[in-house]
Amino acid sequence: MAKKKASKAPRVGKVKSAAKAGEAATFEAGKAAAPAAEAFDEGEVCRELGMYWQSGKGDQFVLRQADGRWAVWPQQAVVDLMRATLPRLIAIKAREDEAVSEVKRVFLWARQNHCLDDVRPALPGYRSGIHVLDSGERVLVRTECKVPEPVAGDWPTIRAVVEGRLDLREEPGGVDQTPWFYSWCKVALESLMRGQPGHWRAGHAVILTGPAGCGKNRIQEQVITPLLGGRAADPQKFLFDADEFNGDVFAAEHLMLSEVPVPSQRTVDRTQLAERIKQVVANPAQRARLMRAEPCTLSPYWRLTISVNDDPDKLRSLPLITSDFGDKVLIFHCKRAPLPIIEWDSEESQRAFRDACTAEISAFAHWLLNEWEIPESLMTYEDGRPATRFGFREWHHPVIKGDLFADTPAAQLMQLIDDATFHSLEWEGGRKLWEMPCRGPRPDEARFWHDSAEELQLLLTGEKDYRCSVSSLAKKLFQHNQCGRMLGRLAAEDGIADVRVMKRDTRFWKGWKIGPPQ
């Protein structure tokens, strides 16, 4: 067996020549201490390289690039990068007194201390970098939206796009809707720039209605999307099919829907759509179903916009404007107006239009943040209550709101009440509802009918001691709709609440007061 070579002791000192001829040289010990071995900090190397390891990804590591992007590198490429860029040469092989080499120590440290649970291409509102989610997961977000840098300047193209469609003052009875739109943009931009994951300020959903080709989509595409960082996704599957994978909407700040593809226009389907929109608007936590991953809960920054033509068939797809939904949505009516371009059919003109909007978005952002102030009239309701949950109060264009209400079961009930005439053998001629006997107090006999919803349904369907002229229509209406629920909808409608239909319970039954048309 070969003898083990003895390790050499470090030389400490120097050899001194003999003083006289024939004498042997002597060794003189040095006075200085032996140099200490250079300390090696593997954590510092990882931090300098910006290197992380994703759990379960074997010998692949994630590194931050010089331009801020993140890329996946194989282990050998990382070794080459260490030896090529670090000021100190990193040992590949273990020395005699080491268990593992310096390179392996770096990789082990990354696996233990820079371990990631997941790497996501993007998360709405999140900056590029490492984030710890509410679930405790450590996640790397590889990209971030490009929020425009506010720069003072002019924005005539964007102004023409917005005000040309939303300022309706020149129309009979028209209203300037731009204060609501600019306020919405201001709240959305401030929230995106200054908020934090899970603590972004919520904002209304926006519904843009108008004739085909009026430029509704231009507001979405050329104004809202670039203002919110340039990323948009179609939320159709997320809104209409909760069981579908929805990773695309968890990679964009702007959820942009053009038209509402509702397969059925029944009240139950429209109500379901309203619930999904409310979830997007008001819930900070959202359920994500990503491919090849378990469902999880995330806190994205979202703003939802929907554009739809204003013909009756299209409007029937929109949710009903109920009290618990109406405060979460802005409904604008757009008019036709020329876009600030020369030849819309020209590809060059379209490109010039888009380039102009892109060039002006920074000036628009600066104006919103530094010059536009939300009007005081938008921050309170008519009864004095504050309307600051979403920054300001909701807006529903009267024409669109009226069209939406006219197509509801509640509106049908109101029409039946007005048309109904009741007959009895004891009377000469017919009577209207507010002239009928009832259980409630009636200080003004000719003004209100005061009784329960069940009693109203029996009267309208002709199931009491009186014949009703609309009994056949009433039976069809009550077959799929509850009378009390429809009365509640009427009691919340502008122009009807507290004037024609109002809730008035007694000690013995829950009642309603219904009066004649004004």
Image (tube, helix red, strand yellow):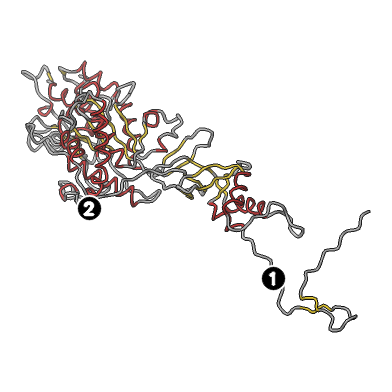
Residue 24 in percent (x, y) is at 88, 78
Residue occupied by mark 1: 35
Q: What residue type is labelled 1?
A: Pro
Picture residue at 33% right of the left edge, 52% below the top? 194
Q: Check the picture and name the quadrant holding the C terminus.
A: top left
Q: Quadrant of residue 18?
A: bottom right
Q: Which of marks 1 and 2 is in front?
A: 1
Q: Nearer the viewer, residue 222 or 421?
A: 222
Residue 4 in percent (x, y) is at 88, 58
Residue extending farthest front: 21
Label 1: state its secondary structure: loop
Distance from the alpha carbon under mark 1 to that under mark 2: 62 Å
Q: Which amino acid does label 2 sit on?
A: Asn
Position of residue 276 in the picture relative to residue 383 (left or right): right
Label 2: state its secondary structure: helix
Is residue 170 in view? yes
Residue 128 in percent (x, y) is at 44, 47
Q: How many marks?
A: 2
Instruction: Give the number of the disc on residue 370.
Output: 2
Residue 96 in percent (x, y) is at 77, 58
